[in-house]
């Protein structure tokens, strides 16, 4: 019997071995033709090298036309797809070759037949692909696509990062970002990021907090491979005027910088494009004023730039001309060529060159009039000759969403980067002061909460993202229907600070008048039930975040003073009687006051709390005197942060890393107020009975990277007529 069991076991092992051999012989390793095709597909889709892929697909289709027809047919199909991306007529003829030469490869032939039918369809549309970024893109940054379209450069408050657009997990999933540079300075904003066309350098325009207070703009460059940030020395200071004046561009080799400025003593109407060596030296004026937004052509021989104009009948102030023209000028100087001019209201901005330098693309912001609601942001394409002259008719492509920022770039893979914002909601919430689960009080967008004296209602700024006007409104403390405060006025206004009086009879707020030439801010009061506005005069142009004193006789606020011949505004805490008078400054430049909603007068009237630019929570005596630091090392941005005293004055609620904390003034310890919310928590108000906190929270609104592809046939179609 034992002998029989051994024979059976041997038979089973033999059978398994035979089966294993059979499996091994059935699973064949990819042959040479298949490996060549896979490598070429990776070159096309991952590396974005269409030209290189075209040559290799041709070779594969020819080499294996007889020995491996399946691979040859697929290679010819991929070749036709490359031609289609480039917008060439060869796509049609190549698909026809697949049908005539490889009819026996039925699946491939059917795909070719479908694509050929789509080519002759009358409607052609680009494709838009969202690139998923697992770690999210920073909300306060600009972005720049590398010349080959494979990396995205962006910034944080003190760092420069590079992120592979296509990661190992797939074409639509970005790779892991890595930091290439870091600075000891803190950037409050970066408004421009650009690559040199050789891909070796990145330049950026950054706003820095200055040690003496205020901020200033500087231009840096850094190797894309990583290294030190170098500040570009400018003999002619970059006196910026608006966001779009801060666009910079590097020559293809990174040796020259194009930027916008004007000479000391000149007005902003004289701003124009200058060229300067990135090593330093005397700048050279290149364009006539007013002009801005320069961008080097890929070969460095030309610069495209935006010409500014004020147009009668559109309500554009003479001192705020809009981008209405696109020009091209040789970098060595000479006659500029007008390649595009807007006829409808709005402005054009952010020009880009195609990788081969034959097309200029730019965004158009369509508005019915100056300061009106933004209606659309289509992209316009203009063909240009080697001499920089326009040829053919402009071609317009509608984008699926509004573009609020810059175009990241146009890569050599002929994909254009776009950054859209995800859907955004900012609502009002309440939470127990001891922490818990937050309850949403409003369905609409709500900011700047302030409690009614009896604690039954919460007043706030009601803001709809489709409407540039912010209204006064209130909601029951338990949540429910929103009621707008009826305000009698002849000029719409935008609110940026709100406070209910201690006796509950009036609302104090700061505002900009909308659709007027008046760009200064104002303090206004209105009865709690609505009515006529009363202005509180301060005699200062920049005043924000007003709060009442506990006795209702005075107000505290953050005021700004422009520093002559610089870009700086110095912010300080002020107080003044409600009835008017000269504001009393409580802080100094060394306090580095941050202009944020975080300003709170203590219940005993003795102190005022505020945030500083160096991430500290401070306290200043209301009667005057040196400031005291309460909390150091606050994380995240405090520019939307709030402050609120407990009714007994024993605690102070504040924001750090977009979360809420309670500071015990006696012990100096802080504890987090749990809310259960995943979002950006902003502004604060503590209920009169001390049991509840109201706050705003924003969810969504995050920047998202998209790629626009397959648009070249649209650019070539008009030229075939």
Image (tube, grey):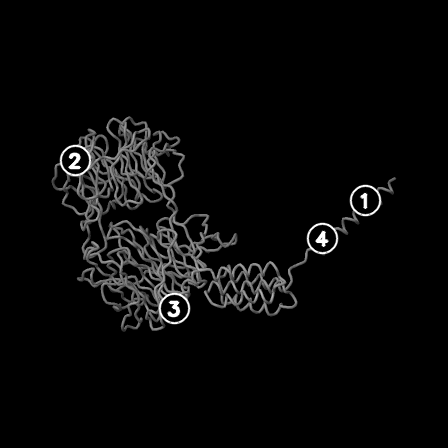
Chain-order first, disc 2 or disc 1: 1
Disc 2 to disc 4, C-alpha distance: 88 Å
Question: Is the residue marked by circle 2 packed among few (<14), some (14-19), or many (20+) residues within 10 Å?
Answer: some
For marks 4 and 1, the one nearer the N-term is: 1
Report the quarter where the N terminus lies: top right
Identified at 35% across, 68% down, the residue is 392
Crowding near the residue tagged with mark 4, few <14, some 14–19, many ≥20 C-alpha atoms within 10 Å: few
Task: Give the Cα separation between the discs numbered 3 and 2.
Answer: 63 Å
Residue that numbered label 4 is attached to: 23
Of badges 2 and 1, nearer the viewer stands: 1
Foreground mark, 2 or 4, reads 4
Distance between the alpha carbons at the discs numbered 3 and 4: 56 Å
Give how far apart the Cα atoms at labels 2 and 1 are.
Answer: 99 Å
Q: Which of the two marks, 3 or 2, is nearer to us in this view?
A: 3
Instruction: Choose between 120 and 241: the one closer to the eye.
Output: 120
CB atoms of marks 2 and 4 within 8 Å: no
Q: Which residue is mark 2?
A: 554
Q: For the point 19% across and 62% down, which residue is it?
A: 264
Circle 3 sits on which residue? 358
Q: Is residue 108 visible?
A: yes
Q: Is residue 601 above or below residue 419?
A: above
Q: Position of residue 88 (x, y in %)?
A: 47, 67
Residue named by callout 1: 9
């Amino acid at each position: 019997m034992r002998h029989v069991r051994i024979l059976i076991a041997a038979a089973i092992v033999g059978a398994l071995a035979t089966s294993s051999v059979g499996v091994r012989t059935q699973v064949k390793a990819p042959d040479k033709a298949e490996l060549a095709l896979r490598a070429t597909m990776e070159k096309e889709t991952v590396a974005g090298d269409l030209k290189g892929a075209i040559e290799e697909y041709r070779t594969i289709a020819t080499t294996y036309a007889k020995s491996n027809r399946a691979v040859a047919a697929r290679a010819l199909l991929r070749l036709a797809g490359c031609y289609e991306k480039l917008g060439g007529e060869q796509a049609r003829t190549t698909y026809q070759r697949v049908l005539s030469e490889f009819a026996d490869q039925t699946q491939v032939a059917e795909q070719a037949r479908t694509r050929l039918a789509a080519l002759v369809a009358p409607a052609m549309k680009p494709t838009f692909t969202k690139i998923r970024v697992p770690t999210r893109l920073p909300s306060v940054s600009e972005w720049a696509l590398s010349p080959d379209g494979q990396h995205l450069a962006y910034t944080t408050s003190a760092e420069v990062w590079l992120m592979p657009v296509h990661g190992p997990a797939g074409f639509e999933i970005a790779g892991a970002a890595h930091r290439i540079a870091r600075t000891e300075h803190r950037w409050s904003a970066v408004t421009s990021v650009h690559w040199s066309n050789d891909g070796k350098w990145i330049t950026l325009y950054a706003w820095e907090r200055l040690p003496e207070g205020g901020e200033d703009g500087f231009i840096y460059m850094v190797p894309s491979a990583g290294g030190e940030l170098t500040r570009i020395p400018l003999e002619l200071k970059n006196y910026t005027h608006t966001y779009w004046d801060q666009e910079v561009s590097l020559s293809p080799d990174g040796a020259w910088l194009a930027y916008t400025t004007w000479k000391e003593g000149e007005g902003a109407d004289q701003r124009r494009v200058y060229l300067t060596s990135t090593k330093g030296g005397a700048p050279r004026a290149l364009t006539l004023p007013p002009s801005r937004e320069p961008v080097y052509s890929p070969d460095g021989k030309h610069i495209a730039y935006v010409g500014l104009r004020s147009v009668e009948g559109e309500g554009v102030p003479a001192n705020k001309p809009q981008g209405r023209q696109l020009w091209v000028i040789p970098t060595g100087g000479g006659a500029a060529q007008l390649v595009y001019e807007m006829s409808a209201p709005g402005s054009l901005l952010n020009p880009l060159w195609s990788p081969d330098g034959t097309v200029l693309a730019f965004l158009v912001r369509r508005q019915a009039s100056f300061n009106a609601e933004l209606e659309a942001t289509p992209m316009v394409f203009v063909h240009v000759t080697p001499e920089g002259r326009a040829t053919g008719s402009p071609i317009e492509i509608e984008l699926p969403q509004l573009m609020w920022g810059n175009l990241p770039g146009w890569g050599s893979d002929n994909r254009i980067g776009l950054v859209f914002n995800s859907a955004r909601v900012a609502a009002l919430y309440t939470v127990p002061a001891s922490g818990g689960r937050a309850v949403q009080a409003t369905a609409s967008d709500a900011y700047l909460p302030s409690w009614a004296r009896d604690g039954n209602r919460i007043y706030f700024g009601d803001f709809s993202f489709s409407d540039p006007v912010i209204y006064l409104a209130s909601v029951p403390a338990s949540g429910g229907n929103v009621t707008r405060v009826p305000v009698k006025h002849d000029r719409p206004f935008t609110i940026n600070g709100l406070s209910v009086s201690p006796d509950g009879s009036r609302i104090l707020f700061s505002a900009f008048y909308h659709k007027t030439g008046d760009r200064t801010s104002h303090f206004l009061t209105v009865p709690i039930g609505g009515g006529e506005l009363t202005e509180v005069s301060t005699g200062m142009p920049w005043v924000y975040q007003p709060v009442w004193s506990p006795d209702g006789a005075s107000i505290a606020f953050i005021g700004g003073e422009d520093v002559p011949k610089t870009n700086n505004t110095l912010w300080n805490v002020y107080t003044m009687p409600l009835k008017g008078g000269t504001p009393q400054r409580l802080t100094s430049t060394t306090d580095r006051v941050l202009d944020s909603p975080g300003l709170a007068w203590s219940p005993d009237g003795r102190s005022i709390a505020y945030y500083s630019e160096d991430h500290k929570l401070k306290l200043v005596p209301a009667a005057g005197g040196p400031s005291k630091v309460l909390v150091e090392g606050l994380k995240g941005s405090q520019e939307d942060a709030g402050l609120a005293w407990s009714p007994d004055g024993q605690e102070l609620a504040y924001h750090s890393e977009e979360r809420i904390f309670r500071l015990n003034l006696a012990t100096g310890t802080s504890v987090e107020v749990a809310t259960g919310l995943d979002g950006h928590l902003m502004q604060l108000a503590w209920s009169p009975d001390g049991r509840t906190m109201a706050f705003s929270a924003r969810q969504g609104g995050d920047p998202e990277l998209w790629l626009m592809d397959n648009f070249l046939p649209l650019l070539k179609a008009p030229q075939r007529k």
